Structure formats: structure tokens, C-alpha cells
Amino acid sequence: MTKILKSALLLLCTVCFFTACSDDNDDNPVLKAPTTFHLNTPALAANGVYDLANSSTLELTCSQPDYGFPAVTKYTVEVATSADMSDVRAMSETFTTAKMNINSADLASLLTDMYVAKGKTEADFPIDGPVYIRLKAVQTTADGTEIAGTEITSNTITLNKVHLLFSLPPVKTPEKLYITGAFNSWSWDSALEMTPVNSATNIFWHLVYIDGSGIKFNTTKAWDGNEAGFTKITVNAASELGSEIIDNGGNIASSTPGWYLMIVECSVVGRDIVYNVTFNKPNVYLMGPVTPAGSWDELQADALFTVPTTATGEFVSPAFSTSVPGGDGDGIRVYVKIPGFDWWKSEFIVIDQKIVYRGNGGDQARVAGSQGQKLYLNFTSETGKVE
């Protein structure tokens, strides 16, 4: 009897165990691939006017895609100005709830950019027209990682009349320009920073070595798609050495490798930055008491530096004709000549073995020099010395 009772209890425990396992599996959610995803049409979509300049947000609502259970979902808003969504663009802000308040200013900026891409100018605004909106949803993990295979796109709704003012900031000429090329193994880390001409913030200059491989320049130290090569510049017809500048796979290259005084004049045409580039002889001059003539006249032939033949070579001045004390007295003065500007608007000097450019600053510190000494300049490493 005892054996029968023990067997019965064992059987009962086994049944309970399997039942519990079955119940646990039934509670585990099963991920479904959603097949429908609905974006609701706002009440004003058909006949109302959406004035983006005089509203803070645009509210959108949707039903969550059916994943088989409530899931963390990321929603991306996509907008278009064409009914076929051929110009669709995604807004940068994403949402995690089925009720979304779209920032009106962000939407206006995006729409303006889309119209400009279609050839509209600021004079064409304000624009009253339809805007087409849809959502993209994707399930994510708790830390925001998207789960592959859970993406779905909603239906498209139409806002029949959106009143849009021109909403892009004005285009300005760049504050900085950087040069990279074969001379520094195409490294932005060691890119040359061009110097603005004093009182002309849209004009930059630098001495640069250009060979058959070439150079590019950019407003940032990065390969970000905005770098300017041969096809993005106009070679100034007044360039002294412009005929030597050639296209090498989009790079600004030279048929006669060597040093150039490169001058970039920036201007704004519509929404584009236009670069007019002058390539002149790499003439560097002493100025003032240390010149052979002790003169303050510009472009003294006997005050010219010698020009190196390599990218790492040194420009060397004539021997100083007299000693200068520096400090509060006279000092070594040196410059390149930018056409149309006084010499001091493109002067520079060496301090602590570094080339320091005046740019848009005031008078530079006066550096001492002794009769018979020379100034040595390396424009690739931006270094120099007096000895």
C-alpha cells in the first residue's frame, strides 16, 4: 500500500511539473511581423491652414504596429512636397509614443530646404501648398537598438495647405579654410589653416606646395563632402601661375609642381559658397629696416626670399642689413603681397619658432634680429627661425 501511495504522489508531481512548464511557455510573448500601421489624419488636414510660422507644434497620432504585445517602438516622421514621395526626407527628431508633437520650426526649415533643392529661391516664398507625411516604425530594445525585421511604413496623409515662410538661416562665407594634399599625405590632422586678409574676412591666403597629385580645401578638417577640389573652384584669370593649375581626379593639381601663393576669395551666390582662387608666385618679402635698402617700399626685389624646391624645404630671406631690437623698437617685418591690399594686411612673423600670422589682429610683437642674420621659414610645418 505504501509503495502504491508513493507511486501516486510521484505521478502527481510529474503532472504538475509539466503543467507549470506549459503555462510558462504560454506566457512568453511571441513576436509578430506587423502588416498594418496606421497614421491618423488630423482634423484640419483637408480644409485647415497650417501656418508653421505661427504655431509651435504639429500633433500627429498613430496606432502602434501589432507586434503581438506592447513593444518599445521608435517612430520617424518622413515628409515630402511631392505626392509620390519622390523627395521624401526624414526629420531628425524621433519619438517613442504614438502621440507626436512635431516642432513647427524644424518642419519649416526642412520643407524650405526641400523647396530650395527644387530650385526655389527666397523670393518665391511664402509658399502655400500640400505637404505629405508618413511614419516609419521599428521595434527597439530597451537601450534603443533597432530590431531587424520589425520595420514598417505607415500610410501617407496629406496636409492640403501649409503656409511656409522662408526658414533657412542666411548663408555666410566661411570663417576658416583648411588645406590638405599630397604635401602632408592627405591628413586633415596636419592640414594648413589659411589666414584671412586683414579687414577682408572673406579672403584667405597661404603658401602651399602643389604637385601633380594635388590638394583640396575645406571649411572643416574632415572628409565631409564639402571639400573643394578643382571642379568646385574658379581659377582667377588674373592668376600669375593659373595656367599651371590642372584637374587630377577632382584635385587641384599642378602641371609644374612647386610652391604657390594661393588666395581664396569666398562669396555667396544664392545658397552656394563660390570660391574664386588665385595662384600667384610664392614671393615672400622682408620689409623695413632689415631690408638691403632699409626701405618701407613694397615689393623690393632685393628683399625677396629664396624659394625651396620641395614641400619640406625652407624659404630663406636675404641677410638683414641692420640690427633691430624688437620689443618696443623696430623688428623684423615680413609679408606676402595680396593684390589690392597693403602689405601689412598679410604680414606674419616667427615667435618661439612658430610662424604667427597677423590675420585680422592688430600689430604683432616686434622680433629682434642682428645684422647678417637671416629668417628661415617652413610653410608646411609652419615653423621658422632667425639665425
Image (spheres, grey):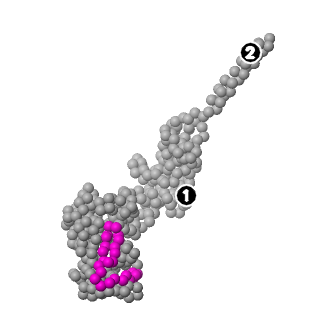
Q: How many marks?
A: 2
Q: Residue at x 28, y 65 (%)?
A: 311
* Residue 145, label in figure: none
Farthest residue toward the top?
1
**Residue 95 drawn above or below residue 36:** below
* Tag shown at residue 57: 1
Give left or right: position of 34 versus 182.
Answer: right
Residue 290 at x, y percent in the picture: 29, 85
Q: Earlier in the sequence, mark 1 or mark 2?
A: 2
Q: Which residue is drawn at the image coordinates 58% and 45% (left, top)? A: 142
Q: Between 324 and 273, which is closer to the camera in this rendering?
A: 324
- Quadrant location of the C terminus in the rendered image: bottom left
**Helix, strand or loop at mark 1:** strand
Identify the residue position indicated by label 2 in the image: 7
Query: What range of the chain is rendered magenta?
Result: 362-387
Quadrant housing the N terminus:
top right
In the image, what residue type sits under mark 2? Ser
Give the x, y percent position of residue 224. 38, 57
With respect to residue 247, does 6 lie above or below? above
* Along the viewing direction, whichever of 49 and 191 lies nearer the viewer: 191
- Image coordinates for residue 303, horizontal then vertical, percent: 25, 81
Separation (CA) of disc 1 from disc 2? 71 Å
Q: Magenta stretch: residue 374 in it?
A: yes
Residue 339 quadrant? bottom left
Say if residue 386 shows up in the picture: yes
Q: Position of residue 96 (x, y in %)?
A: 57, 48
Kind of residue at badge 1: Thr
**Mark 2 neighbour density, 10 Å: few (under 14) some (14–19) many (20 or more):** few
Residue visible at 65% across and 30% down in the picture = 24
